[in-house]
Image (cartoon, rainbow, N blue to C red):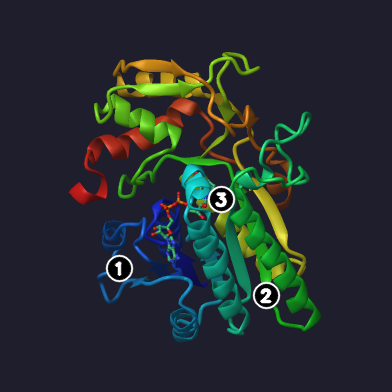
Amino acid sequence: MNVLVTGGAGYIGSHACQRLVRDGHTVVALDSLDRGHREPMALLGADDPESLLTFVEGTVGDRQLVSRLLAEHAIDTVMHFAALAYVGESVDDPMRYYRTNVEAGVALVDACVDAPAVTRFIFSSSCATYGDPPEGMVPVPESCPQVPTSPYGRTKLMLEDVLRDTARACAQSSRDLRVAMLRYFNVAGSDRSGTLGEDHTPETHLIPVAIHAAMGKRDHMSIFGTDYPTADGTCVRDYVHVEDLIDAHVRVAERLESAPTEPLAYNVGIGLGYSVREVLDAVKRVSGVEFEVREAPRRTGDAVALYAEPAKIQAELGWHAQVTDLDEIVASAWRWMSAHPAGYAGA
Ligand SMILES: NC(=O)c1ccc[n+]([C@@H]2O[C@H](COP(=O)([O-])OP(=O)(O)OC[C@H]3O[C@@H](n4cnc5c(N)ncnc54)[C@H](O)[C@@H]3O)[C@@H](O)[C@H]2O)c1
């Protein structure tokens, strides 16, 4: 495959570049570096002219640049990871999210439709498109109503709609463009070789934030809400290992080669829910550090329990998460983060 990976210098996108290059595919990583890092691109060999990986700094909203890259590199597959992805920030500055995740996303899709060699488009969607699932819908199947509760979730659902409409219109006009939406749950961990890691600023994801507490980069951890109707009173989430997630992308790309033209949608999660307390205990066990945990009131908008029903992707693509043990997921994140206390800046 010749793959355009948008957001390739980010956490998940860089892991996609690594796997694709390892599998012998040609990869162009396009990233604005707004939230990503140049270091993982260099670590994956992008500075070597012989490498299968090319890094281009730019935005997916730059129609001219994208069209040129699609043509020059004979791109047949697009994996669209580039986005802004903080729920809280999307509430404070929704226009920034609509411009980046929707407007720039539409420009990208439009450029792909006009590039006849592009036949596969795989979109990083999110469980945030489900909002707070109704009773009886957890674990969450793909048929759960998509009622996002944040601007971030709405931007993801909007681009899903754009892609569904585009795929159907393409099918009617005999333009072969097949689309898949992967709705990730919480992505965690880092690659087995220890090359890549998770380095977000600010960091808001539970596992890396707790690791920061274990590393002494923050003086305590807060649990927001301890009176939820769950086994230990704290919220429950699904943590999928980043390499398993990328494996789902590779499988879906293969499936799109022979798939019907109807858009595909899959949940990507392990199908198990771990509570906030369980995650914090796992970080303490793995790191061997006892950090302070403070109990705080609930935050508005936090769903009680959100974990995937992955039966569809298991049955149709044969995808099964290889890493489901919480300590193993945490250990994989801990390995890179504890070896890189300053993140990529210190690499
Ligand atoms: N991390 C998770 O748990 C999670 C869960 C569900 C969905 N997702 C989705 O997965 C994708 C990747 O998430 P991530 O955690 O790797 O985030 P990330 O911030 O590490 O990566 C996103 C990358 O996109 C780049 N980018 C942003 N806007 C751009 C633009 N207009 N043009 C080019 N590049 C741009 C950023 O610089 C960054 O490198 C996002 O679409 C996110 O919404 C992530």
Q: Are marks 3 and 2 in contact (CB under 8 Å)?
A: no
Q: Residue furthest left?
A: 346
List the residue tagged with mark 2.
Answer: 177
Label at residue 196: none
Mark 1 element type: loop
Coordinates of residue 304 in the picture (x, y in percent): 63, 27
Q: Amino acid at mark 2?
A: Leu
Task: Kindly state the secondary structure of the residue where label 3 is placed.
Answer: helix
Q: Amino acid at mark 3?
A: Tyr
User: Mark 2 or mark 1, which is nearer the start of the sequence?
Assistant: 1
- Locate residue 182, reporting x and y percent: 62, 53
**Mark 3 or 2, closer to the camera:** 3
Mark number displayed over residue 46? 1
**Residue 169 screen position, x and y as percent:** 76, 76
Judging depth in this view, the residue of 104 and 56 nearest the camera is 104
Question: In the displayed structure, would residue 247 be above or below residue 210?
Answer: below
Q: Mark 3 = which residue? A: 152
**Which numbered disc flags the more N-terminal residue, 3 or 1?**
1
Any atom of ligand 1 within 8 Å of the CB at mark 1? no
Answer yes or no: is residue 112 visible: yes
